[in-house]
Image (tube, grey):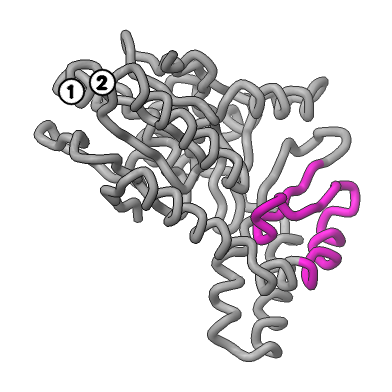
């Protein structure tokens, strides 16, 4: 669930820092360290490692790029293990890992999603899968922002290629339409009368919050009501920031905040601040 919070810049920094610290505590690091060797056995040909700053996010990178980058999130399992005995936790993790070893069911259209990433991420993925059939399917939505098709599983999100869409029997437009519907169904909807001009608003959620950038038509209407002063930042998939701010010192402060939050995020989407112009996100200067 995505919820909006209206905060001052200083309070938001404190809130975000607390959120990040909670993801990167000693208990989280110990939990990940304990199970990394077992996760490595699931895919011996992959480089398996914890995301810096978020040890419960486990990345599987195959050197040949044959399966594309895959991320497995242990956050829910970690939280569940806090409520049961160590023996029960081990049993649950064994079941979780056994499930990972099973052949995945056929890719389903209802699991299509759209993630938003910047140019550096897209370049990384393309380099990872160069020479394979897993070249990502994407569309440009801003100066350096891209919407990328992905497949959602219970504990992971993976970028997909054209072959996956063929397996689903979907052409490009059908896949994008379905993925957009499925993704936006997870995102907070706001109406014609909503106006995020009272302070800085932080949208927070478990995942796909960054995909609020897909709602360009809605954000354009908000920007029009604010005289074009709407500015947004997308520091991670867990936070999306919106504020009404004029050019000058206030915008400079917001840009500094965006960079700081990006540095604090486990996997930053972008350090930039954007305004909506002509249907796309442009980097605010």
- Kindly identify which residue carries mark 1: 226
- Above or below, comparing residue 88 to residue 222 in the picture: below
Q: In which quarter of the image is residue 94?
A: bottom right
Quarter of the image with the N terminus in it: bottom left
Q: Quadrant of residue 36?
A: bottom right
Q: Residue at x 72, y 27 (%)?
A: 124
Crowd tier of the residue under label 1, counting other residues whose Cα lies within 10 Å: few below 14, some 14–19, many 20 or above: some
Q: What stretch is highlighted in magenta?
A: 33-61
Q: Locate residue 171, reporting x and y percent.
A: 50, 21
In the image, residue 221 lies in the stretch drawn in magenta = no
Q: Locate residue 32, reporting x and y percent.
A: 73, 66
Q: Relative to the observer, which residue lies in front, 281 or 9? A: 9
Q: Which residue is drawn at 21% across and 36% down?
A: 196
In the image, residue 37 lies in the stretch drawn in magenta = yes
> What mark, if any, has residue 96 been given in the picture?
none
Q: Is residue 114 visible?
A: no
- Kindly identify which residue carries mark 2: 229
Label 2–label 1 contact, CB within 8 A = yes
Residue 185 falls left or right of residue 70: left
Q: Locate residue 261, reporting x and y percent.
A: 52, 42
Q: Relative to the observer, which residue lies in front, 152 or 82? A: 82
- Above or below, comparing residue 145 to residue 104 in the picture: above
Q: Check disc 2 and report its element: helix, strand or loop.
A: loop
Q: Check disc 1 and report its element: helix, strand or loop.
A: loop
Q: Quadrant of residue 92?
A: bottom right
Q: Which residue is drawn at 63% across and 41% down?
A: 158
């Amino acid at each position: 669930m995505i919820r909006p919070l209206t905060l001052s810049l200083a309070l938001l920094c404190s809130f975000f820092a607390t959120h990040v610290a909670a993801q990167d505590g000693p208990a989280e690091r110990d939990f990940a360290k304990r199970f990394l060797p077992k996760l490595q056995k699931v895919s011996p040909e992959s480089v398996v490692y914890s995301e810096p700053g978020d040890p419960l996010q486990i990345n599987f990178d195959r050197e040949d790029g044959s399966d594309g980058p895959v991320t497995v999130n242990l956050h829910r399992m970690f939280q569940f293990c806090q409520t049961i005995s160590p023996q029960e936790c081990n049993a649950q993790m064994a079941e979780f890992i056994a499930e990972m070893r099973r052949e995945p069911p056929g890719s389903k259209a209802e699991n299509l999603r759209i993630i938003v990433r910047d140019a550096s991420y897209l370049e990384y993925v393309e380099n990872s899968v160069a020479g394979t059939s897993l070249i990502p399917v994407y569309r440009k939505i801003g100066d350096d922002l891209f919407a990328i098709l992905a497949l959602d599983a219970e504990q992971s999100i993976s970028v997909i290629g054209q072959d996956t869409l063929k397996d689903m029997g979907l052409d490009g437009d059908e896949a994008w339409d379905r993925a957009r519907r499925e993704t936006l169904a997870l995102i907070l909807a706001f109406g014609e009368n909503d106006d995020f001009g009272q302070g800085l608003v932080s949208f927070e959620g478990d995942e796909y919050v960054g995909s609020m950038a897909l709602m360009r038509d809605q954000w354009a209407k908000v920007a029009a009501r604010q005289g074009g002063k709407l500015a947004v930042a997308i520091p991670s998939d867990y936070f999306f920031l919106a504020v009404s701010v004029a050019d000058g010192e206030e915008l400079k402060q917001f840009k500094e905040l965006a960079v700081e939050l990006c540095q604090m995020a486990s996997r930053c989407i972008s350090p930039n601040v954007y305004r909506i112009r002509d249907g796309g996100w442009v980097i605010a200067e």
